[in-house]
Image: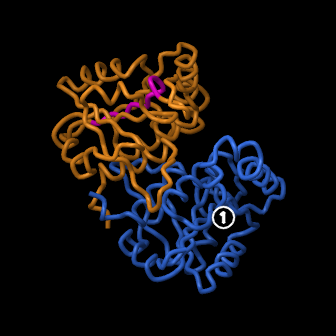
Chain colours: A blue, B orange
Amino acid sequence: MSDKPPLAVALVHYPVLDRRGDRVTSAVTNLDLHDIARIACTYGVDSFYVVTPVAAQQELVAAILGHWREGHGAGYNPDRKDALARVQVVDSLDAACQDWEARCQRRIQPLLTGARCTDGLSFGEGRELLQRTPTLLVLGTGWGLAPEVFAQGWPMLTAICGVGDYNHLPVRAATAIILDRLLIGREVE
Amino acid sequence: MSDKPPLAVALVHYPVLDRRGDRVTSAVTNLDLHDIARIACTYGVDSFYVVTPVAAQQELVAAILGHWREGHGAGYNPDRKDALARVQVVDSLDAACQDWEARCQRRIQPLLTGARCTDGLSFGEGRELLQRTPTLLVLGTGWGLAPEVFAQGWPMLTAICGVGDYNHLPVRAATAIILDRLLIGREVE
């Protein structure tokens, strides 16, 4: 880890909402694992927590990680091995916070995201936060993080705004755009 | 289409390279269709061309589009219907250029992308290009566009640079980041 405070990403599968606004546990997808691990690796994110309380889903993640980190996939695609090296599966968002705090050896700040956040931190303010303190960027699957996550008093980022009203980015794409804005930001020319 | 020159995206499955540098036709994936259609919709991209010469793959795309645009999926998820409305499958990159030129009723400019482009247009220059002329943003699947595409004399964008040396973004993530940089760019605050 460099002098810059470390950054981790948490992809939450519970508690999240479904299309009807009901609280559900979403399924872990192989695709989110690979894509977000590769995106995290590109932007120097130190750790990627996959949050699910479901034992069968945790076993699925472990099997996928085993294949690419130690099994046939490790030799077939070493780049993928590098990306997936930073993935860790945990039971809950609290467990992700605790593990990340233990690894950073100082207080960490969760930073929430959501497509319906209209009055959160600007990306400029998010960049300042990342300069000050180790951060855990929290993304929800399904139709987004459940209200109790937002009730914790943690800061949230204002939603990505595209060109029109359409507001249904895949979480993989949102992760890529958010990390690019927070870590590369206005220096892009 | 607004006063701004229209923009289209082409996702090329031939001619592209594989991991060994051989020229291949890559397989169309359901995932790229959905993710890039949703990303394109978010950023107001007018058309999304899926380029493959393989008839069976073209039929697969048609079946997927039929399900979501007219079949059960259209009622189940109208947002997805909106996103997939802009997808069109074509035989070749030339066919995409010709169709896009016909739709724009003026000369269009292909703008190439690639993870190994080190001396292309900056994103600022790319933004200026998009202000001047209707553009077709061209992305390769697999290990990137084959050399003959770069030999056409079309401008190319400098590769996305993350924080370290890792240079293996999924094409879906690269599309999201490129569109965000080109269409939202430095105004993000």
**Measured along the vertical axis of the image, is residue B63 above or below residue A124?**
above
The residue carrying mark 1 is A49
The answer to if A88 sits in the magenta stretch is no
Name the quarter where the C terminus of chain A is drawn: bottom left
Q: Count the marks: how many?
A: 1
Residue B11 in magenta? Answer: yes
Q: In which quarter of the image is the N terminus of chain A?
A: bottom right
Q: Does A149 sit left or right of A44 as displayed?
A: right
Q: Position of residue B82 (x, y in %)?
A: 45, 36
Q: Considering only vertical position in the picture, is B65 above or below A21?
A: above
Give how far across and how far down residue A144 sits, in percent.
Answer: 58, 59
Indicate the secondary structure of the residue bearing disc 1: strand
- Tell me the magenta residue range: B7-16
| Side of A18 where B158 appears, left or right | left
Eyeballing the image, is B4 above or below B152?
A: below
- Residue B175 shows up from this direction: yes
Taking depth in this image into account, of A47 and A54 the one nearest to the observer is: A47
Q: Which amino acid does label 1 sit on?
A: Tyr
Q: Which chain carries label 1?
A: A
Q: Which residue is drawn at 71% across and 43% down?
A: A73
